[in-house]
C-alpha cells in the first residue's frame, strides 16, 4: 500500500529533516551529570504498584506473608499480551494494600508491599547464552516475560511492540537517545556508562524483529555519548549500527518527531512507525532487553535522574521499582530550602506528586524537585487573545486555540476534525500561551470525553445493528411462515384437486359403466 | 515522615509571558511615532491619548463590574489602554474631547464588551470607535493640522488644551487658519477636479513620498513594527501582504495612469497604512490566526484600502478595510486550516 514510503524510510538518518514548531529550552542537564550513576541501597519497604501501565491493574500473583526471591513475578497484566511485575528484591510480602502509586491521577492504588530480607537473592535465572542462534520468537517471548516496557516514559509493553513489529516487517530499528525534556539525563548517563549493554540490546532487538539496521539518535549536545557508543559499536563488531546526532529542539525525542527528523516522513494519522517499516525503542529499553536475554533478569530497576534546584546534590540513581521516592531524595542530600514541587518526569510533560511516599515506577525517568522561584505562583487564566503562538509551536500542526474553543463548547465533531487525536501532549502550547490557559489539560479532558462519546456511539451502533438484525429476522420468519402456509395451502389445494380428479374419474367410470350397461 | 507537596498541571515552568506584557510591548513600540507626532504636530496628540485612555479605562471598569468580571486583572491586561492609544493616534490632534468619549464608548462598550470582552470581539475596537466618530462627526474629524514647519499659526500647550476641552480657538484665529488638508485629501480632491496628481504634489504639504511629517511618523511606526516582529509579538504575514499588495497594485495603477494615481510609495507613506499594517491589522483577536489566513487578511486589507482611496468617498480606507476583513476573518480561518500532522 505505502511501499514507496517504507522504501523512503529505509534512508532514515542519512539526512536530517525538520519538524513543525517546537521549543528551544534551557537544558539544565549538566547539574545531574557531574557524578556517576549510584545504586540505591536496600529500602525498608518496597511498594510495587499493580497499576503501572496506563491500562488496568495487574492481578497479584503473591499472597500476604509469602516469601519471594528477587525477580519472582508478583503480578500479571490481564490484557496487552500479558506482561509481568517482578519482586525488586528478596523478602516477604507484608501486604497487598492501597498506597500512593505514582499514578498521574493522584489516586491511591493497590501495591505489593515487600519487606526485604536483606539478602537480595535472585531466584533461578535462565539466561540465553546463544541469543544469535535463538529463534526470534523465543527472544520476543523472553522480552515479554521480563516485564519490559518502553522506558522513555510511554511504558508501552515492549513485548507487544516487538510482536506487532515482527508481523509487519521492519527494516530499521531506531534507538531513541534524544531525551529532549530539560533536566532529564538518565539516558545520557546510561549511554556514557553502559554503551556495550545498549549495543548488545540493539542487536538482540534487531534479531527479534528482523530489522536490517539500527539508527541510534542522540542529541547534538551530548559530546561524551557519541564517543562511548562509537567505541561500543566497534567492540561489538556488529555491522549496520549507526549513530545520528539530532538538533536539540523540544520535543524532538517524541516518537513521531524523531521519525520525521530522521526520515522527513510523517507517521500517518492514527498510525505507528511500523507503517513505515520502523520500530522505535528507548536506549534504556535496549539495556533492559540485553539483561533479560543474556542474564535472564527481569526489569526491576531503572536509572532515575533526581534533580532540580530543590535537590541538594542532583545526580542519577539506579533505583529499584517500588523504592519510595523519599529514599532517592535522601540519597541525593535531601531537599534544598524552598523545595516547592515534586514532579515525576520532566518539567514539560511530567506530573506533580502530592507526596514523596510515592514509589519509583517503570515510567519514572526523573524525579524533579522545583523551588518557589522555578514555578512562581500560578497566574490567573485570561481569555484567549488568538495570538496563534500555540499553533506556531505545535509539532502536530494543530490549532490548539481552536481546539480549546471547540472542547469547551462541547463541539465534538469539530474537535475530531481539528485533529485532537494527533495531540502528543508535549505542552509547547501551554508553555507559550500568554493567557495561561491550561491547554493540555483541556486536551486530555477532550480526549477522554471523545473516548466516552465514541464508546457510546459504538454501543448505539451495535444496538441499532442488533435491532435491525432482529427486525429482519422477524421479517424473515414471517415471510417463511407465510410461504409455509402458502405451500401448505398449495399442497392442500393439490390434494383437493387430486381428490376431485379421482372423484371425477370414478364418476366417469361409473357413468361409463352405466353407459355400457 | 513523608513530605507533602502542592500539585499543579504541567508544564512546570514560570509563565513565559502574559497578555499585559504583550500589550505593553505594543504600546512601547508606538512611542517613537508618538514622539514624532508631537514633533511635527504639537502636543495635541498627548492630550488625546490621555483623554481616550481615561475614558477607555473608565468604560472598561464599568463594563467589567456590570459583567461581574474581576476588574483588576482585566484592567491590568492593558488591552483597553492600547485601544485608546491607537484610537487617539487616528483622530486629529485638536479634536474636541467628546470625540474621544464617543469613540471609546462605542469601542469599549459596544465593540468589545457587548461581544463578550477581551478575546471575543469580532471587530477591532479602536477601528470600530474611529469609524463611528468619522461617520458621525465628519467636520471635527477632518480638522487636521499642517506640520509645524509650514504651519502659519502653531498652537502652544495651553491653547491646544483650550481647543480640545473648550472648543475655544485663540482669539483672532479661525479653524480655516490653523487646519489644512492632508496629502490624501488633496489627492482625492485634485483627482475629482480633473487635476494631475503631479500638480497636486507641488503643494508644500507633500514630502518626499507621502505627506510632509506624516511620512516620518510612518517611518517610526515601521521601526516600532519591526521591533515587534523581532520580539515575536506580531508575525510578518499581515504587514508583508498588506504593504506588498498596496505596493504592487499601486505600482500597476501608477504605471498605467500616473496622472490620476499616486505613486505606490505615496500610498504606503500616507494616511494610516503603516500603523495599520503593523499595529491594527495585526490585532490577533479580530484578525486571522492561521498563517495562510493572515496572508489573505493582509492582502484583503491592502486591496480594500486602495479601492476606497481610489473610488470611495473617504480619502483613506484603512479603518474600513480592517473592519471589512474582520468580518471575513472567521470564514478565512475556517478555509485556511493547516494540515494536521500525518493527514
Image (tube, coloured by chain):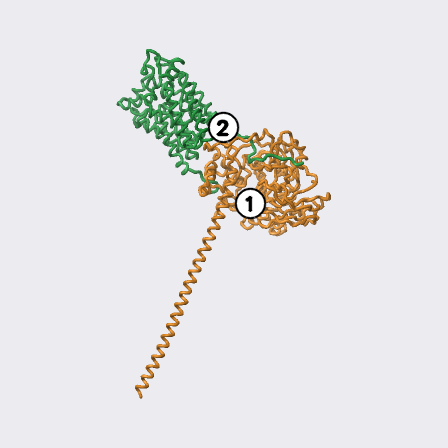
Decide: is A467 above or below A150: below
Q: Are marks 2 and 1 in contact (CB under 8 Å)?
A: no
* Front residue of this view, candidates A109 and B228: A109
Would residue A461 be found to the left or right of residue A337 on screen?
left
**Numbered tag placed on residue A136 in the rendering:** none
- In the picture, which chain is green? B
Q: Is residue B22 visible?
A: no
The residue labelled by disc 1 is A279
Q: Neighbour class for label 1 at 10 Å: few (<14), some, many (≥20)?
A: many
Q: Residue at x 37, y 13 (%)?
A: B154
Number of marks in the rendered image: 2
Q: Which color is chain A depicted in?
A: orange
Which SS class for mark 2? helix
* Front residue of this view, candidates A169 and A505: A505
Q: Quadrant of residue A150?
A: top right
Quarter of the figure that contains the C terminus of chain A: bottom left
* Front residue of this view, candidates A516 and B333: A516
Q: In the displayed image of the protein, which residue is found farthest to the left?
A: B194
**Numbered tag placed on residue B73 in the rendering:** 2
Q: Is residue B142 visible?
A: yes
Would residue A254 be found to the left or right of residue A418 on screen?
right
* Residue A287 locus on image (x, y percent): 63, 43
Amino acid at each position: 500500500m505505502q511501499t514507496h514510503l517504507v522504501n523512503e524510510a529505509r534512508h532514515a538518518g542519512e539526512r536530517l529533516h525538520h519538524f513543525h514548531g517546537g521549543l528551544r529550552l534551557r537544558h539544565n542537564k549538566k547539574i545531574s551529570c557531574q557524578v556517576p550513576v549510584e545504586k540505591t541501597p536496600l529500602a525498608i519497604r518496597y511498594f510495587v504498584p499493580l497499576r503501572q501501565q496506563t491500562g488496568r491493574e495487574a492481578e497479584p500473583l503473591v499472597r500476604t506473608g509469602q516469601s519471594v526471591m528477587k525477580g519472582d513475578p508478583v503480578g500479571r497484566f490481564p490484557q496487552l499480551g500479558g506482561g509481568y511485575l517482578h519482586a525488586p528484591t528478596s523478602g516477604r510480602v507484608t501486604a497487598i494494600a492501597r498506597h500512593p502509586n505514582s499514578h498521574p491521577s493522584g489516586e491511591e492504588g493497590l501495591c505489593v508491599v515487600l519487606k526485604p530480607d536483606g539478602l537480595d537473592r535472585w531466584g533461578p535465572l535462565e539466561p540465553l547464552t546463544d541469543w544469535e542462534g535463538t529463534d526470534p520468537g523465543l527472544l520476543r517471548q523472553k522480552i515479554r516475560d521480563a516485564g519490559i516496557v518502553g522506558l522513555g516514559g510511554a511504558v508501552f509493553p515492549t513485548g507487544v511492540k516487538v510482536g506487532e513489529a515482527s508481523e509487519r516487517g521492519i527494516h530499521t530499528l531506531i534507538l531513541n537517545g534524544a531525551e529532549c525534556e530539560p533536566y532529564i539525563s538518565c539516558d545520557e548517563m546510561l549511554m556514557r556508562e553502559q554503551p556495550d549493554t545498549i549495543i548488545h540490546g540493539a542487536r538482540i532487538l534487531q534479531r527479534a524483529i528482523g530489522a536490517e539496521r539500527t539508527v541510534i539518535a542522540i542529541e547534538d549536545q551530548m559530546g561524551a555519548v557519541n564517543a562511548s557508543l562509537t567505541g561500543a559499536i566497534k567492540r561489538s563488531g556488529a555491522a549496520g549500527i549507526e549513530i545520528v546526532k539530532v538538533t536539540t529542539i523540544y520535543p524532538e525525542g517524541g516518537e513521531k518527531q524523531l521519525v520525521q527528523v530522521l526520515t522527513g516522513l510523517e507517521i500517518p494519522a492514527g498510525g505507528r512507525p511500523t507503517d513505515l517499516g520502523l520500530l522505535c525503542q528507548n536506549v534504556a529499553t535496549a539495556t533492559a532487553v540485553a539483561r533479560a536475554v543474556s542474564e535472564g533478569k527481569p526489569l526491576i530497576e531503572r536509572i532515575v535522574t533526581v534533580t532540580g534546584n530543590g535537590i541538594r546534590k542532583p545526580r542519577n540513581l539506579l533505583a529499584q521499582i517500588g523504592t519510595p521516592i523519599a529514599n532517592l531524595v535522601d540519597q541525593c542530600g535531601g531537599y534544598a530550602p524552598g523545595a516547592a514541587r515534586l514532579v515525576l518526569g520532566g518539567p514539560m510533560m511530567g506530573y506533580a506528586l502530592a507526596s514523596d511516599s510515592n514509589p519509583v515506577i517503570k515510567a519514572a525517568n526523573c524525579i524533579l524537585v522545583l523551588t518557589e522561584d522555578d514555578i512562581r505562583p500560578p497566574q490567573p487564566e485570561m481569555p484567549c487573545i488568538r495570538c496563534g503562538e500555540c499553533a506556531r509551536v505545535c509539532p502536530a500542526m494543530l490549532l490548539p486555540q481552536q481546539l480549546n474553543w471547540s472542547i469547551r463548547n462541547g463541539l465534538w465533531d469539530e474537535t475530531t476534525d481539528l485533529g485532537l487525536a494527533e495531540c502528543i501532549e508535549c505542552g509547547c502550547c501551554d508553555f507559550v500561551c500568554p493567557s495561561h490557559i491550561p491547554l493540555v489539560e483541556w486536551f486530555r479532558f477532550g480526549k477522554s470525553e471523545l473516548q466516552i462519546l465514541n464508546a457510546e456511539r459504538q454501543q448505539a451502533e451495535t444496538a441499532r445493528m442488533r435491532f435491525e438484525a432482529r427486525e429482519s429476522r422477524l421479517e424473515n420468519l414471517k415471510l417463511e411462515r407465510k410461504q409455509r402456509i402458502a405451500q401448505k395451502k398449495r399442497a392442500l389445494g393439490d390434494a383437493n384437486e387430486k381428490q376431485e380428479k379421482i372423484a371425477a374419474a370414478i364418476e366417469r367410470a361409473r357413468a361409463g359403466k352405466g353407459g355400457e350397461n | 515522615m513523608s513530605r507533602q507537596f502542592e500539585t499543579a498541571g504541567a508544564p512546570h515552568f514560570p509563565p513565559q509571558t502574559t497578555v499585559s506584557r504583550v500589550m505593553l510591548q505594543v504600546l512601547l513600540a508606538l512611542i517613537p511615532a508618538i514622539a514624532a507626532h508631537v514633533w511635527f504636530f504639537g502636543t495635541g496628540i498627548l492630550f488625546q491619548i490621555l483623554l481616550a485612555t481615561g475614558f477607555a479605562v473608565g468604560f472598561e471598569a464599568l463594563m467589567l463590574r456590570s459583567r461581574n468580571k474581576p476588574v483588576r486583572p482585566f484592567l491590568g491586561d492593558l488591552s483597553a489602554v492600547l485601544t485608546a492609544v491607537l484610537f487617539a493616534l487616528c483622530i486629529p490632534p485638536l479634536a474636541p474631547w467628546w470625540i474621544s468619549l464617543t469613540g471609546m464608548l462605542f469601542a469599549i462598550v459596544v465593540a468589545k464588551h457587548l461581544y463578550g470582552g477581551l478575546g471575543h470581539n469580532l471587530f477591532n475596537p479602536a477601528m470600530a470607535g474611529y469609524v463611528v466618530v468619522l461617520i458621525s462627526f465628519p467636520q471635527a474629524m477632518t480638522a487636521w493640522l499642517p506640520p509645524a514647519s509650514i504651519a502659519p499659526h502653531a498652537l502652544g500647550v495651553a491653547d491646544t488644551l483650550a481647543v480640545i476641552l473648550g472648543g475655544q480657538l485663540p482669539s483672532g484665529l479661525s479653524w480655516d487658519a490653523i487646519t489644512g488638508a492632508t496629502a490624501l485629501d488633496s489627492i482625492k480632491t485634485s483627482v475629482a477636479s480633473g487635476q494631475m496628481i503631479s500638480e497636486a504634489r507641488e503643494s508644500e504639504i507633500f514630502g518626499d513620498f507621502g505627506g510632509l511629517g506624516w511620512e516620518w511618523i510612518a517611518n517610526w511606526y515601521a521601526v516600532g513594527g519591526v521591533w515587534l516582529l523581532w520580539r515575536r509579538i506580531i508575525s510578518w504575514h499581515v504587514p508583508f501582504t498588506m504593504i506588498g499588495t498596496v505596493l504592487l497594485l499601486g505600482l500597476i495603477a501608477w504605471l498605467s495612469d500616473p496622472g490620476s494615481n499616486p505613486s505606490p510609495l505615496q500610498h504606503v507613506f500616507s494616511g494610516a497604512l503603516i500603523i495599520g499594517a503593523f499595529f491594527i491589522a495585526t490585532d490577533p483577536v479580530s484578525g486571522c490566526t492561521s498563517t495562510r489566513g493572515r496572508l489573505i487578511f493582509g492582502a484583503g486589507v491592502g486591496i480594500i484600502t486602495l479601492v476606497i482611496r481610489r473610488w470611495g468617498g473617504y480619502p483613506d480606507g484603512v479603518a474600513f478595510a480592517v473592519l471589512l476583513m474582520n468580518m471575513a476573518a472567521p470564514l478565512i480561518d475556517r478555509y485556511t486550516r493547516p494540515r494536521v500532522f500525518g493527514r
